[in-house]
Image (cartoon, rainbow, N blue to C red):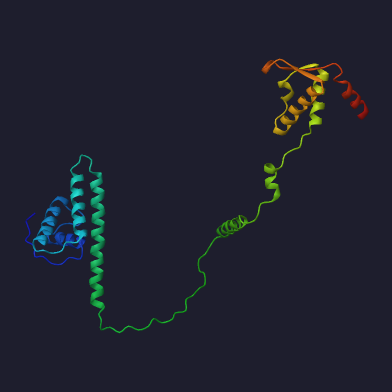
Amino acid sequence: MEKISYKLSAFEGPLDLLLYLISKNKLNICDIQISELLDQYMEHINAMKEQDMDIASEFLEMAARLVYIKTVSLLPKHEEAEELQKELTGQLLEYQECKKVALQLAENINFNSLVREPEEIEFDQSYRRFHSPSELLAAYLNAAGRGKRFIPPPPEAFSGIVTHRIVSVASQIIHVLRRLWRNSEVKYEAIFDEKREKSDLVATFLAVLELVKGKRVRIEGENQNATIKLMNGGMKNWKSKSSGEQ
């Protein structure tokens, strides 16, 4: 690439300067040699400094950007450099199109033209799109579902949270005595085998304490070897109560 002697002029930005260099050197905007373009860009920046021209920060930022692209392109894996160069090429193409449109507008618009107030236009507000019945149904169900979010939940929704089954201690006393009536000695843990809910476990435990307190049963052993034994006369009151109920 031959070296260019610059005739300095005002540029609107770094992209404007790059387009100038690409046009001057008759380069393909889609296949820019960053290394050669960078050298001429820096020469132009230095020439602007020598003539005491103010250099905006955006020109220096573009110079740093070109240096970074050139540096990355020297690495063994330069995929990042290709992406950065594609991004710069896209910006240059967009800027080039904007300049073309600006020139066309400048030819058709001038300060001597007459401008009148915009006319009031009655817009057609009829809906012209076609929707299948399935689309309309889905939209309706979606809107109806959003409306249901604001409806308070029914009391049944809280039944599993704030309600629980009441288990009386008396019923569990009868349960324990029935187990001991069939077998006068039962493993302590076996009393709780069929209990799954917390209220059943608590009521059964209180029933055992009540029977021990009334000296109707006694607990022998410790831990897993603990057993519940029926004391003499422990079934008397329960049998009489059962006979009376019959």
- Determine which quarter of the picture holds residue 79: top left
Residue 213 falls left or right of residue 44:
right
The quadrant in which the N terminus is found is bottom left
Question: Count of labels shown?
Answer: 0
Q: Is residue 25 visible?
A: no
- Determine which quarter of the picture holds residue 45: bottom left
Image location of residue 138, percent across then percent down? 57, 56
- Residue in front for this viewpoint, 205 or 148: 205
Image location of residue 210, percent across then percent down? 79, 26
User: 13 above or below 120?
Assistant: above
The quadrant in which the C terminus is found is top right
Image location of residue 219, percent across then percent down? 75, 18
Q: Is residue 229 visible?
A: yes
- Residue in front for this viewpoint, 75 or 231: 231
For the point 17% across and 51% down, which residue is it? 34
Image location of residue 187, percent across then percent down? 73, 18
For the point 25% across and 46% down, which residue is it? 80
- Residue in front for this viewpoint, 63 or 234: 234
For the point 52% across and 64% down, which residue is it? 130
